[in-house]
Image: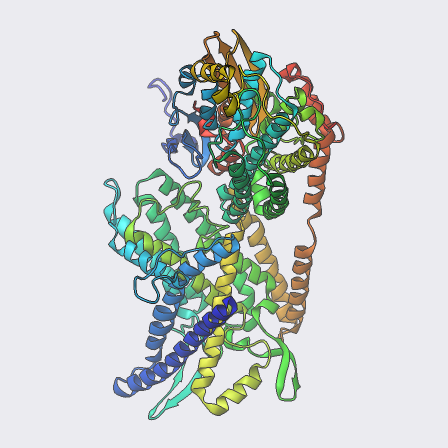
Amino acid sequence: MASADDQYDPTPSDDELEAHLQTRNMVVNLGPSHPATHGTVRLRIELDGETIVSMDPEIGFLHRGFQKSCENVTWTQVLPYTDRLDYVASLANNFGYLSAVESLMGIEIPERAKYIRVIGAELHRIASHLTTIGASGLELGGFSAFLYAIEARELLTDRVTELTGARLTTSYGRIGGINRDLPAGWEEKVLKSLIKLEELLDETDKLLTRNRIFTDRMRGTGVITTEDALDFGFTGPCIRANGVNYDVRKAKPYWAYDQLDFSVPLGNNGDNFDRFYLRVLETHQSLKIIRQCFKQMPAGPVMIDDWRIAMPPKENVYSSIEGVIAHFKLVMEGVPVPVGEIYHATESPNGELGWYLKSDGSGRPYKCHVRAPGFQILSGLSKMCVGRMLPDLIPTFDTINMIGGEVEQ
Amino acid sequence: MRLGVVFTGVALIVGALFGVSAVAYVGGAVVESLMLEKLGISGGGHIVQILVSMLLVVMVIATLLTLAERKWSAFMQDRTGPNRARIALPGIKDSPLAGLPHIATDVIKMLTKEAFRPATANKFLFNLAPMLAFAPAFALFAIVPSGPTLDIAIGSYAAKVVMSPTNPDAGLLLMFAVASLAVYGTSLAGWSSNNKFALLGGVRASSQMVSYEVALGLSLVGMMAAFSTVRLAGDDGMAAMQARYLWSFNAGGFDIGLPAWGIFLQPAGFILFFAAAFAETKRAPFDSPEGESEIVGYFLEYSGMQFGLFMISEFVEVVVLSGVLAAIFFGGWSLPFGNEWLTMKLSAISPILTGAVFGTIFWVKVVLLCYLQLVIRWTFPRFRYDQIQTLGWKILLPLGLVNLFVSGALILRDPSLKSLAIVGILEIVAVAMLTLTPPRQVRREQEAASHGGGHGHDDHGHDAHDAHGHAPAAALPAGTAGH
């Protein structure tokens, strides 16, 4: 404002007379129940028109005390809890956890069990990727592509049911190997399912990647720089979309991955399309891995031959004192894990699934912490979306594939 | 078995359309002559057309489209579709009846559900919005002719029947005027419900509909110029004029040739109009005002029959758009070949039969165009809000202007429209070739992605590698890409 001393100027400038519109940014709560939030997460978004000014992902709606629960049960009994972390790929969690416990104990599992673990983990990697690929279509209004992908995933769910007895909560494998060998005739059925799956995947792929509207909406949206992605601790497809070649299966091979021939697809833009298409390419690699596994898999035991770790066969429990003692000790005290701590990581569909386990030798975990890949990626979401439009958030939220169960333990 | 069901269904639909068309002609003639005789008012036949084509046919097709959309999307997606709702009567209680009971349950649900209004909503505008959304969509059909103009005589009642609810001189201009009213319904719905998501939807809807009006109007100017009329119905309307041939020869009484259909004269205009009108109906891929996975939609707070009005107005828009398309671009009620032959044969029997057959041809075209819209809706993902604006202003509008100038020049040079048709057919060939050519660019990129992925060091792999180098990632275990 001009002070009274100033000379009065009878001809005011234009901007002096302009009445400024009082605008306020709009705050919108996306979630916890919103069609685009898979799982339950709340995104508090400040909007200027349709442009995102600031964003704050808020988790906690699915928190169920995973870590505390683990401290109250034996090492084996933790297994069912791991099903519920990344519920789209529960086998990857099961086997990742078992692998971590085995490294803490310093034991080596039989060769056949290693291959079965690879097969299981890759089946569920495909299932998880198919869900993400299909959901990309769903989020953008292309419902048909989603159902093609889900039809393919359903085939895998059926095969996993035959293998483990459950569609979702598999709880498959035990410390020291696998509790049951593959069912008779399962291999042929899986190989046939994979052929059908490949057809459906190609169909979904064609429906989406050759659609101009789809590529326009995916390319150049949800971009994150490599530096930012690494700072946030991105892993899995989200970091490989930036061209960073980091895959635990190659970087630090576990199970039978060093004996298998597969490549790690890389993107270079770090946008939604790269994250989406990388998953399509990874699915093809997983199919290749599974087919190799069935060819290379040796016959033999699937469980370690040590009654301190593996359950003794039932006939031994009923007929020998050693069997009874081993059974009793395993059931009452659990698997003896030596005092120590370990960080062990496997490659889950969404990235590095790390387990920080600490044992005080009591038969129960002293501490069981999961480095869920989705948590780090979700924290980077606002970096990807601020300054962009609200509709860009939707495919971005899909391609980072946050799974509520593993982010909120 | 299945084929039998399909044939029965098709026969039922065609038969129903035939019957309705015949009723429209007979009723039109009777009412027209009665009103002229008793009250001295002409144009009474239009009342019958309002009742028959707007209230009966359009509403019934729109209602059945809700079922068709479910069934057809299910078919496209390897699902069974609606089959749970059944009628507990002996004989049919185990049959899903092709999902027909679903329509009944839907209607009962919507009518009996509480029409909830948020406490903070503006009551007047909130109640007004669904009506404003429904009425213009419905009224659009007023100018669409559903059959040829014929002299019908039944006993002592004889009259000239014009088969459209109205036939104003303004014609298409009336359609544009009414269509532009539809934006009030959606934007008021978004604004008055006092919900942030609904507001976003309302804003998106109004910007989309306002900007597409321009392209919508422009895309039809070529057709108006070609036929020097803005009327659709009547003997000098666009629909009737498309029946004549540009080139034809007579094969033993049966005429074959290229009719002056809008699609041949103005293929660019057709594509532009179809895109713009599709955006006006707010269905996928232009459904960003609804965007159920993003902002849920401008009708977020509506329930009960108020929501039902929004829903049914969408389907009415589909039928109306099909009717307009059929009348402007697909020759109205005329056949592409043998039209004169059929007219001759039929009018020798009875003018009512002529009317009923050509009315059926028109409605079958409408149904097929509805089907085309369903396929598009279930195939494409959704545009982003700003991409819709880009498409409207930067692609459709300039293309519309170019199309207008080219067509105008061609019409001036050759009023017989033959050169316009030649250019039009060249356009169709060009579009077909573009569509059938495999997208080379995408394929190359796919190969690059998998290739670069496999080895990680060739061509664009370098950028990624450099970025990797000076990032904290150097600490990460060096992965061996490929093998």
Q: Is residue A303 above or below residue A158?
A: above
Q: Is residue B454 above or below residue B74?
A: above
Q: Nearer the viewer, residue B287 or B292?
A: B292
Q: Could you say where residue A204 lies in the image, as x and y percent from the top left?
A: 58, 46
Left or right: B151 as drawn, with respect to A244: left
Q: Among all residues in the image, which is located at the extreme right?
A: B458
What's the residue at 48%, 73% (across, down)? B362
Q: Nearer the viewer, residue B186 or B58?
A: B58
Q: Could you say where residue A318 lies in the image, as x and y percent from the top left?
A: 47, 22
Q: Quadrant of the C terminus of chain B?
A: top right
Q: Nearer the viewer, residue B129 or A365?
A: A365
Indicate the quadrant where residue B309 lies: bottom left
Indicate the quadrant where residue B106 lies: bottom left
Residue B19 in view (yes/no): yes
Q: Nearer the viewer, residue B140 or B288?
A: B288
Please give the count of numbered marks on the rendered protein.
0
Q: Is residue B337 above or below residue A236?
A: below
Residue A13 in view (yes/no): no
Q: Could you say where residue B28 lies in the image, as x and y percent from the top left?
A: 36, 81
Left or right: B130 as drawn, with respect to A349: left
Indicate the quadrant where residue B269 lies: bottom right
Visual colour scheme: rainbow
